Amino acid sequence: MIEPHAPAPPGAPASWGEGGQSPARLPVRPGTGRFLVLAGVFVCAACGLVYELELVALASYLMGDSVTQASVVLSVMVFAMGVGSLAAKRLRCRAAAGFGTVEAVLALIGGCSAMALYAVFAWTGDWGGPWSAGPRCLLVAFSLAIGLLIGAEVPLLMELIQRIRRQDAGRAVADLFAADYVGALVGGLAFPFLLLPLLGQLTGALLTGAVNAVAGGALVLGLFRRDLSRRGRWLLLVANIVVLVLLATAAALVDDFERAARQAVYGGDVRVALRTGVQEVVLTGGTRGRPLALFLDGRLRVSSRDERLYHEALVHPAMSGGPHARVLVLGGGDGLAVREVLRHPGVERVDVIEPDPAVTRLALRDPALSALNRHALADPRVHVRTADVFCGLRHTRRTYDVVVADLPDPGITASTKLYSQEFYGLARRVLAPGGRLVVHAGPVTSRPWVFWTVEATIRAADLRTVPYRVGGRASGFAAGPDRSPNGSRAPRDWGFVLAARTPPALTLDPREPRLSTLTRASLRADARAASRTRVRGLPPSTLVHPRYAD
């Protein structure tokens, strides 16, 4: 092994002594110093991956379509890392000072990125609306800045580790990247299993920034302090203290910030706000005559202003076309579709597959929501099972007269598999002879391509279909299972597809419950209106070839 102060032999790495630098003067033995540098690489890599995942998760939550958001964030970040590595070559002659500065800036930008993005979303409006250019550019800007700083770490760390103990460049790179990749593994696992469930996105990002600042500052000020001038040491120390104070202040104010941002997004009537293992659940209104609204992951799932029209149109045409003793509701943990099912005499059993138990608890215990669903989930005929809807349907062994798919919009990436040919094949398997399937397929007028892709996919599963729609506006406000909180993209209608093994009849049984607005005449008129928007020749959506986009 070559001693750190020995003259550079022929073929030694170019980094040795480059820029007039001599070997590092360490306060510890070279072996210990090398271990500490690799430990710093490990911690910084873990923090860097947390920043990436936090941007992807927050962008997917706020903007939808997680595939697109992940592609944008990761591609921009990887590109920026390459640019950052090239730019850092100019800092190699001052590697210690450069690395300390990079880590302080990275800790501040990465730690505050989630709060800044959420603030822009909350106070500028819907990211899909007229203000969308600003937030989207901000997302790209954060991805670019974080990627530049992460990329700058590698050549600087390579310079530092070679100055401790000179070795073959290939071995040095192997050691450096081994620590980097192991740190990335730890950061990648810590984000979904530790930081997100225990601290949430905002506090988790701030804590990560603090760890990043401490690790970078401690490595430079503790191990390479002799490479810095006295003034440089003080400047770096003050910079890190300022970063930590800013992050700590933001963490202390994060609860107040979340409340203010939540009110900006949802209004001032927020009664319940919780983050489950599945999604964010927010319940507003429902008291003192204010309309109740249920938001799931920022999307308006239920509004008491017009939910009755949506649920009546979803449930009653399927219940009126034949036997309906056994009913399966996919989703619908709010109990509102079940409420409509139970209005029909002759219902013997209703099974509900809901992925989030927190929603069903709210539907059972919240006074306003349970009153709205008329305590439907407490009926002894109703059996709720908590499971992923796709897997729950796959493992269902019973057959049903009616299957009601009360699911989020097909354009949401997480819901795409629930609108696939494979999913409808599973639904067909559980249909009893003469059974019917009804599917919420998104708005017809504003997105006919998506609606008719759903219809084509159901037909590809060897089911006959009858598409129909109902108008969705209520006093200028429209809600549904696929709307943004501020209503800027409110649909003009809701689209549905009724399906069966044989051509189903689109009708309402006059002997069944009296409905608030839906009639046989209006239903048939809306079905004709929907047929006029037909987009022909669309291929079906499958698990390996999804064809929906948010």
Image (cartoon, grey):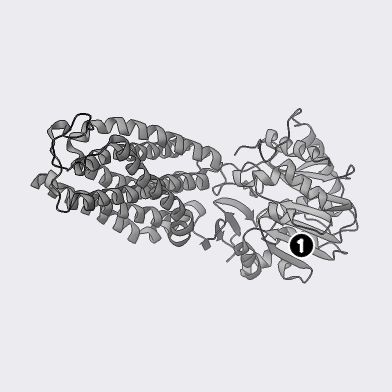
Name the residue nearer the viewer: 195 or 99: 99
Question: Dot 1: few (<14), some (14–19), or many (≥20) neighbours within 10 Å?
Answer: some
Residue found farthest to the top: 537
Residue 130 lies left or right of residue 145; in this view the side is right
Q: Residue 169 appears at what percent x and percent y? A: 28, 35
Amino acid type of the residue tagged 1 in the rendering: Asp
Task: State how many labels appear.
Answer: 1
Horizontal side of 502 relative to 392 (left or right) equals right
Residue at horizontal 74%, vertical 41%? 421
Kindly indicate the quadrant of the structure image that contains residue 73: top left
Place of residue 176 in the rendered image (x, y in percent of width and height, measured from the top left): 32, 43
Q: Based on the displayed image, in which of its 4 quarters is residue 526 positioned?
A: top right
Relative to 526, is 362 above or below? below
Residue nearest the observer in this picture, 81 or 287: 81
Q: Mark 1 points at which residue?
A: 351
Position of 78 compared to 241: left or right? right
Q: Closest to the observer: 396 or 243?
A: 396
Q: Residue, x 68% and y 53% (percent of image)?
A: 306
* Residue at the image position 27 percent from the left and 52 percent from the top: 215
Residue drawn at the location 66% of the way across and 38% of the way down: 544
Q: Quadrant of the N terminus?
A: top left
Quick check: can you spot residue 287?
Answer: yes
Q: In which quarter of the image is residue 77?
A: top left
Q: What element carries label 1?
A: strand
Q: Residue furthest front?
A: 1
